């Protein structure tokens, strides 16, 4: 989970570094490769003002999507994944549990109703770097996800295929 969350934060940070706001982040258009590298689809389409992952401020037609509203939407997607984790799942190292707590904390802040108080994507990425030395990254230290049967397309799958309904 940690590897997936950090990859998503890096991918969205790359989009934002180009001055682009996604505006449509949800489980259906966030895809991951089998190596847990995240890709965002639906760039350039009109923003989504409805749906569970839309930031509260976007629910009126007067507000345009912002980088902060993208952070809210990513937080929502990650929250859904965290809720589906088996609470009794074992991690390969004790740092896996610490990594999940760091993600949970970031997600809780990302879901703030106040756009100005949402955390930066770099906070999640930086916490990944500070968890240990280069040999002990979050990769492999967290719970594995498996997409639904037949959901892998060209080595990628939608995050919604990891979430139990």
Image (spheres, rainbow, N blue to C red):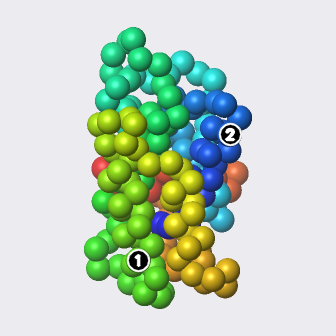
**Is residue 24 in sight in this rendering?**
yes
Separation of marks 2 and 1 at Cα, in angstroms = 28 Å
- Within 10 Å of disc 1 (Cα), the crowding (few <14, some 14-19, many 20+) is some
Label drawn at residue 111: none
Q: Quadrant of residue 136?
A: bottom right
- The x and y percentages for residue 126 are 57, 63
- At 44% from the left and 33% from the top, the residue drawn is 69
- The x and y percentages for residue 18 are 71, 35
- The x and y percentages for residue 151 are 54, 52
Q: Which type of secondary structure does the marked residue at label 1 adopt?
A: helix
- At 39% from the left and 78% from the top, the residue drawn is 97
Q: Quadrant of residue 106?
A: bottom left
Judged left or right of residue 120, residue 50 is left
Mark before the other along the chain sequence, 2 or 1? 2
Vertical comparison of 134 with 76: above or below: below
What residue occupies the far bottom of the structure in this picture?
A: 93
Q: Which residue is mark 1?
A: 98
- At 66% from the left and 65% from the top, the residue drawn is 35
Q: How many callouts does the rendering have?
A: 2
- At 51% from the left and 57% from the top, the residue drawn is 123
Q: Do labels 2 and 1 touch, CB within 8 Å?
A: no
Judged left or right of residue 79, residue 14 is right
Vertical comparison of 61 with 93: above or below: above
Q: Which residue is mark 2?
A: 17
- Within 10 Å of disc 2 (Cα), the crowding (few <14, some 14-19, many 20+) is few
Judged left or right of residue 59, residue 17 is right
Q: Which type of secondary structure does the marked residue at label 2 adopt?
A: helix
Please name whichever residue, 162 or 95, is drawn nearer the observer in this view of the structure: 95
What residue occupies the far front of the structure in this picture?
A: 116
**Is residue 160 in sight in this rendering?**
no
């Amino acid at each position: 989970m940690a590897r997936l969350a950090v990859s998503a934060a890096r991918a969205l940070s790359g989009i934002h570094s180009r001055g682009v706001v996604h505006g449509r982040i949800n489980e259906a258009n966030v895809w991951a490769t089998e190596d847990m590298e995240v890709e965002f689809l639906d760039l350039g389409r009109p923003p989504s003002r409805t749906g569970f992952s839309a930031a509260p401020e976007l629910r009126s037609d007067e507000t345009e999507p912002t980088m902060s509203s993208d952070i809210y939407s990513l937080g929502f997607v990650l929250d859904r994944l965290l809720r589906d984790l088996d609470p009794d799942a074992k991690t390969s190292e004790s740092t896996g549990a610490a990594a999940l707590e760091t993600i949970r904390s970031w997600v809780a802040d990302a879901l703030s109703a106040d756009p100005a108080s949402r955390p930066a994507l770099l906070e999640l990425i930086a916490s990944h770097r500070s968890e240990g030395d280069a040999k002990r990254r979050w990769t492999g230290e967290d719970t594995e996800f498996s997409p639904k049967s037949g959901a892998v397309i060209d080595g990628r799958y939608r995050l919604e295929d990891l979430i139990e309904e």
